[in-house]
Image: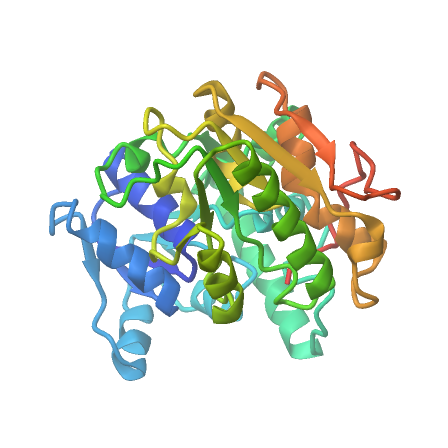
Amino acid sequence: MTGLALVESPLQVLGLVDALLAGSLDPVTAVVRTDPARATFRALATHLSPTLLVSAPTGPGAARRAMIEPADILVLGDPLSGVAQARLLLPGRPSEIVLVDDGTATRLVVDALLGRAPLVRAHVPVALRRRVLGAVASATLARQAGARRLTLRTCVGVPDDDRVALAREGVVVAQHTLGHVRALDVGAPVTEDVVVLGSALADDGLIAADAYDDWLTRTVDDALSAGGTVRYLAHRREPASRLAALARRGVRTDTVPLPAELRLRPGNGVRRVVSLPTSVLLTIGAALVEDGVDVDAQAVPDAWWTAKVPPALRAHLDQPRARLADGPGTARPRQRRSPGDATAAPENPTMPSEARPA
């Protein structure tokens, strides 16, 4: 059988590789569409048999040709993507479609599969043509589900009620923990006592940059004053000035192009992880707690949000933190409001389906 995977983010690559290692997928050719995802792909591909995973030739023309090739199995990392939706509409229905995780966007995909939301990005202006494409793609996925040829392979977790509803629609939900890919020895272990996860919220214009920098300073001060060592896992758009300021204070700043899911491993000495809401809390937060790591997942104070972020989107962006705290069957991480916060987001916010992280 022939397989094709379209992946755009490091997390989507992790989901794809985990499925291959678990034997849940036949060999595929992967079209990897962004530089961060390619860096993750290259780091992991050396650990796989070349018969399992093949990268499509680089270059726009070669990638386009690979994407239109017939495939028995189609793996999609982002069904909200116009490229993925256009691929769904090509002639020749695949025998199976597999959806892999993309963080909080997985929640939006579930809502779309259950008919609660359109298959388009929320809070982003969408032309009529894109809405029509999303509607047709959604109908295509519904037909696949009705024939039990649609699988959602997720480490994010699906609430029990939604799992039952998805099964009723014919969607096969395959829950996993990224255990196969996390077991790979990819090197570059994190061994500091305290790890601070960098956030793109400020650099995406969602929260005030000065508030984020003040939070980061206080967080680092707390860790250093306790005599611990600190590692800052930067996000991929981190400004160099911020990293330089942290390095001058003795913090090891880290821009290794591997997702935090692969860097934070049990037994390497990490005692505490401090973070604002991030998809890492969804993907491995519970595993870190089970490993005995103190996960300090902090809410974003209301005063930090910029005017461009409505309350519904704020609640959606807080979803990883809230779900880690309240997820069934998981240990509860330590939760606290951010320093100086008099108006922090509620501990159990509503999680609307219409919001989309930028």
Q: Nearer the viewer, residue 143 or 75?
A: 75
Q: Measured from the top left, where is residue 351 in percent x and y?
A: 75, 42
Q: Residue furthest bottom?
A: 61
Q: Residue furthest left?
A: 50
Above or below 13: residue 221 = above
**Number of labelled discs?**
0
Residue pictured at 36% horizontal, 26% vertical: 266
Above or below 109: residue 213 = below
Q: Nearer the viewer, residue 316 or 165?
A: 316
Q: Measured from the top left, where is residue 167 in percent x and y?
A: 57, 30
The image quadrant of residue 181 is: top left
- Determine if residue 339 is in view: yes
Q: Nearer the viewer, residue 198 or 80?
A: 198
In which quadrant of the rendered image does the C terminus lie? bottom right
Position of 261 with respect to 164 (left or right) is left
Residue pictured at 79% horizontal, 68% vertical: 308
Question: How is colour applied across the structure in the image?
Answer: rainbow
Q: Measured from the top left, where is residue 140 in percent x and y?
A: 53, 56
Q: Measured from the top left, where is residue 106 in percent x and y?
A: 57, 46
Q: Residue furthest right?
A: 342
- Determine if residue 95 is in view: no
Residue pictured at 70% horizontal, 44% vertical: 318
Above or below 158: residue 98 = below
Residue pictured at 67% horizontal, 45% vertical: 111
